[in-house]
Image: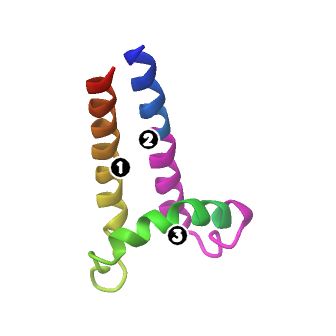
Amino acid sequence: MMDQVYDVVMLLQNIYTFMIIGYVLLSWLPNARESFIGVFLGKLVEPYLSIFRRFIPPIGGMLDLSPILAVFALRFVAFGLIAVIDFFI
């Protein structure tokens, strides 16, 4: 049972991590964020990234490190969720 919970939580964490990476990569291409995929990813990823952007301003006005911290925090939360579920099961 716990293996299935672990697999599901890690799958969801990996999917969201790839969504964050995809959204960041779209920022490197001109007008890519205005495409259907860019708008879709923006609606799903931007609310989460905005939390970290409040604390970490872009370096030099261009380099945004908030996605890196967001991915680390997401992984930390995923493992915490697994530990809490493991405690109760």
Q: Position of residue 18 (x, y in %)?
A: 49, 47
Secondary structure state at the residue bearing disc 2: helix
Q: On residue 13, which mark appears?
A: 2
Quadrant into which the C terminus falls = top left
Mark 3 / mark 1, whichever is N-terminal: 3
Q: Residue at x 52, y 70 (%)?
A: 27
Q: Residue at x 46, y 54 (%)?
A: 21
In the picture provided, is 1 more to the left or to the right than 86? right
User: Do the residues under discs 1 and 2 have CB atoms within 8 angstroms?
Assistant: yes
The question of residue 75 being in magenta is answered with no
Secondary structure state at the residue bearing disc 3: loop
Q: What amino acid is labelled 2 in the image?
A: Gln
Q: Which residue is mark 1?
A: 74
Q: Which residue is mark 3?
A: 27
Q: Position of residue 41 (x, y in %)?
A: 60, 60
Q: Position of residue 53 (x, y in %)?
A: 35, 74
**Relative to 18, residue 67 above or below:** below
